[in-house]
Amino acid sequence: MENEKRGAFTPLSPRLALQLAAPHTWPASIMPVLIAAGCAAATIGRLSPFMTIVLLVICVLMQASVNTFNDYFDYVKGTDSADDNVEVADAVLIYNAVNPRSVLALAIGFLATAFLAGIYVMYYAGLIPLVIAAVGAVIVVAYSGGKTPISYLPIGEAVSGLVMGGLIPLACYQVLTGRLEFMMLVWAIPAIIGVGLIMMTNNTCDIEKDIAAGRRTLPVLLGRERARAIYHGLLVAWVVAVVLIVRLWFVNGFVVMPFMVLATYPLLAALWKSPLAPPSRIGAMGQIGSINVALGAFYAAALML
């Protein structure tokens, strides 16, 4: 804040902009698109690679916008500090004298670019994706901004999971198939759980910080031990959901499931042992991101078979 008073700021370079976009969190938007693409290929027997890429770009831009908005609002509210066990690349405004207004403009720019790309999607698929995207955009802003942001409430995990893991596959499936298929929300349950667990990992590690900031997240209300117990249950439910969905609706891909379990078990076992405390935050966030990539990739592969 002192730099803002003096007007001495570091220019927002492409490197810092990329750090604000937080590429390590992009699996939360990439995997739901790939799952929708897999379901589209399985149910209608064809897939547009170009449209899939456009959808990936839009969703990554929206994820980048969420990340940048979150960093901006946490900084201006004073809830972030250098003592929060985050990597330098994850706290641009803390470790670099960047003008917060430039960061806000970047967040708005990411969101606006996503909507511009969405114009092509609307021309191709109609207004249904716009309606779903508009709901998502409102939640994106409400998640970090406003008098009582969603991220300060015990519904943050559920909202982020449903929006990123549920609405994205629903909209993408409609674009790729021309059909609004609400069964996609069932097929997207693994993505909903996976995205929600990313948020729960962060919030459980940040319990002490969030209490000091006045946040009432789910882990804050539960306490670390009960939060970890629910967290472990969700890890099991995540894998079981993938196996059951493939077995019930996409039987040809079931051959992938043993390989998925064998490949992800070491990652799941390591995360299971994590205390989800401040010192383990960086490692736990890396692990949950890796599991999202691994499970999502195997799930998408099973769908496409």
Image (tube, helix red, strand yellow):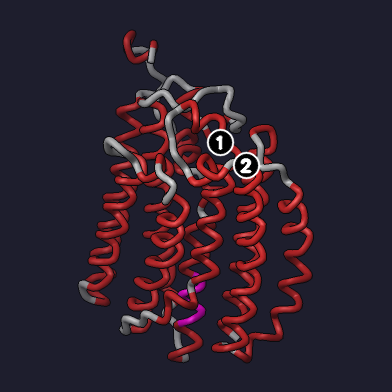
Residues rendered magenta in the picture: 34-39
Residue 252 lies left or right of residue 273; in this view the side is left
Residue at the outermost top position: 6
Residue lying at 79% horizontally and 59% vertically, measured from the top left: 266
For label 2, the SS is helix
Which quadrant of the figure has residue 93?
top left
Residue 27 position, x and y percent, is 54, 57
Tell me whether circle 2 and circle 1 mark residues in contact (CB < 8 Å): yes
Labelled disc at residue 207:
1
Residue 192 position, x and y percent, is 49, 64
Residue 254 lies left or right of residue 151; in this view the side is right
Please state which amino acid type lies under the numbered disc 2: Arg
Q: Along the line of sight, which residue is nearer the eye, 9 or 232?
A: 232
Residue 145 lies left or right of residue 20; in this view the side is left
Residue lying at 40% horizontally and 56% vertically, measured from the top left: 159
Dominant secondary-structure state across the stretch colored magenta: helix
